Amino acid sequence: MGRPNRLTPASVRAAKAAGRYADGECLFLNVSKTGAKSWVARITRNGKQRDIGLGSVSLVTLAKAREACRDVRAQVKAGLDPIAERKRAAGVPNFRAVAAKLIDENRKSWSNAKHAAQWLSTLETYVFPKLGDRQIDEITPADAKDVLMDIWLEKPETARRVRQRIGAVLDWAHTEGYRPDRVLLPTAGKGLPRQPQGVRHQPALPYSKLPEFMADLRSSENISRLALEFLILTARRSGEVLGANWAEFDLDNQLWTVPGERIKTEKRKADPKPHTVPLCPSAMALLGRLQKYKTNHSDLLFSGLKRGQPLSDGTLAKLLRVMEAKDEQGRQAVPHGFRSTFRTWVSDATSYPRELAEKALGHALPSHVEAAYDRSDMVNKRRQLMAAYDSFANGTNGVVALAG
């Protein structure tokens, strides 16, 4: 038998001095220095002592506090965590909500705002479409494997980051009491094929097939096809294209300025500079065709199905699979591979200088000396280059040279 109760309604009202007053059976009346009174259940679980608040005296009577304390003790005796059970009863959040809380909690400790943006962007692109609306306590290693399967070989480094970030969200949910156990995500990789070691080039469509591919791409029109066409015509990364909004465009001067925070640099600079992209005639015409897809709730060029969200990179990859675009080895081409298509075309089919091609792709020059002396964006020369590429992609021109 437990110790008899020590408190009475009268003694609870009379308690004025700050401190704790024991009632027995792990229940305490807590009086703060300000005179506020509340109930606390002190429990021992897994060898550790914890205090669990049961509410204010103004809202919870002594009898109700004793009843709540008995419930807490019963949960501990059954091997349950009372705090976790309380959160579970209040409703288990979905993966998207837990990820948002984790990012918000860690934002101040991360070195720069871009890191938080990268975290969110990675989850929005690869994880939320499949797991975003799932309750956090229902997600299994098999679910994580299903997400990773789409990008494990195609984007090995990205896949590893995705796995780490899914694991971090699930771990945080466990510590907050939303999951009864941890999920060891390294085990999720055991059912996936072995990733190749070293540098792996993205599967890219041979440039000789580009005119035929563009004709096929333009045979019908939807927002996904327009996004892929714009990516090809500008030789930009999918993240830069899919995140584009109308405020970034100077249509009078036919220029697109990609903000630095959306640019992935080769050296992973903390603060990359904006990149100006001269728009070829077909890209300008495409922007005109995009006008009918504008929405009132978003300034994005390529809005996805979810309000305020862009198309996902997976949408473009799926489109390429449907179109059966393959590289010379028979591998499925990927959106990023069109940058290689462009770069190979410049080298093999034109006399444009290497530096101009690298500048068009937004690459840093390999030589520090070259970079120090090259302060120009070469916009006018790049405009000629992109116009020539446009002509080639349209099947109207082949080998070209830089005008004097």
Image: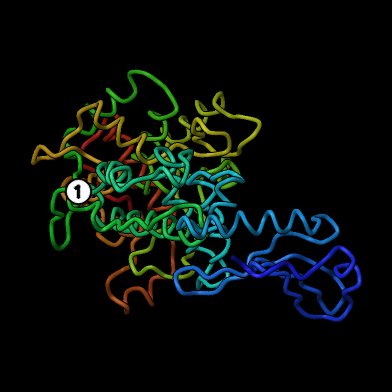
Q: Which residue is mark 1?
A: 153
In the foreground, 280 or 221:
221
* Residue 274 visible to the viewer: no
Image quarter of the C terminus: bottom left
Residue drawn where x is 29% and y is 53% of the image = 159
The location of residue 261, given as percent across then percent down, is 50, 60
Residue drawn where x is 35% and y is 38% of the image = 314
Instruction: Give the answer, above or below, for where 65 lies relative to 231.
Output: below
Furthest residue to the front?
Answer: 1
In the foreground, 381 or 55:
55
The location of residue 385, given as percent across then percent down, is 33, 47
Furthest residue to the top?
Answer: 220
Question: Mark 1: which amino acid?
Answer: Leu
Image color mode? rainbow
In the foreground, 51 or 219:
51
Residue drawn where x is 82% and y is 80% of the image = 18
